[in-house]
Amino acid sequence: MRAIDELADADGPAWPRLHEMVTASSVPAKLLPVDRDEGRRCLLQMQVTARSMLGAFVLNTGGLLLDDGWLRVFGGGSAVAGGLPSLGQVNGFPTVFDAAWNPVVGLVVGHDVVGGVFALNGHDPSASGRPGAPGQMIYFAPDTLAWEALEVGHSAWVSWLLSGNLETFYAGLRWPGWREEAGALGPSQGIAVFPFLWSEEAHSDLAATSRRPVPMREVLGVAADFAGQLGPADPGDLGEV
């Protein structure tokens, strides 16, 4: 086990690069202030250093809001109003450091407002019925109810998010006026879409669906339930919010 100071004070931290990427991004991006104690708790439990992009996120940010809140990337959590839960809270980290605990399946690192989930694979994704290689990013798609391999690691994924690719990635999941609807949400809210995103009706005319703000927990719960019934497999843990 490495002590928190060894992890936090590592040479060559990724934070300056992350901050520069966010500042220079053409994508609307907002870094939230971090709860320092919670960020250090997360870093200690993960046993990663501040040299990694993941470590930089939990140690220096309360999270990142992209495209007016459409996508939420979790960091060290933010105690201020309008903040996000920490990576540790989303993934159920032990309250006190436990060397025996590890996220076997992987880590949920981001949610979008319609129930899409970005996760970082654990050491044996195939054993959990998930695609992709260990340590690579995957996405639970709310319009197919299945996980998709993204074939990049966490650092490359963050760079990809900030490079303007979200518009193409979400082309089939956004309707006229999506930005205003996402921007009006609170940090614990998502958007319920009916007919559901995986339905033929939504696939043929997304703009004709009805939508309303609901607790994000409800959006994720509905997606998980239907994935278990109609999808290729139970998606497993989609994160706690």
Image: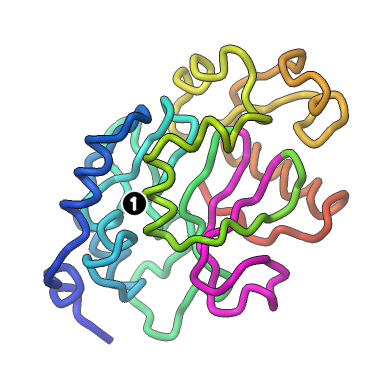
Instruction: Tell me which residue sits at (22%, 67%) in the image.
Output: 51
Magenta residues (range): 114-142
- Picture coordinates of residue 149, whole percent (x, y): 62, 59
Instruction: Tell me which residue sits at (77%, 60%) in the image.
Output: 234
- Picture coordinates of residue 188, whole percent (x, y): 48, 35
Residue 155: image quadrant is bottom left
Number of callouts:
1
Instruction: Tell me which residue sits at (57%, 33%) in the image.
Output: 168
Please check the rendered image and state whether residue 125 is part of the magenta-colored stretch, yes or no.
yes
Please check the rendered image and state whether residue 59 is part of the magenta-colored stretch, yes or no.
no
Q: Label 1 neighbourhood size at 10 Å, few (<14), some (14-19), many (20+)?
A: many
Q: How is the image coloured?
A: rainbow
- Picture coordinates of residue 136, whole percent (x, y): 51, 66
Amino acid on which the number 1 mark rests in the picture: Gly
Instruction: Tell me which residue sits at (72%, 49%) in the image.
Output: 224
Relative to residue 70, is residue 239 depicted above or below? below
Residue located beneath label 1 in the image? 75
Relative to residue 29, is residue 54 depicted above or below? below
**Pick the front one: 165 or 116:** 165
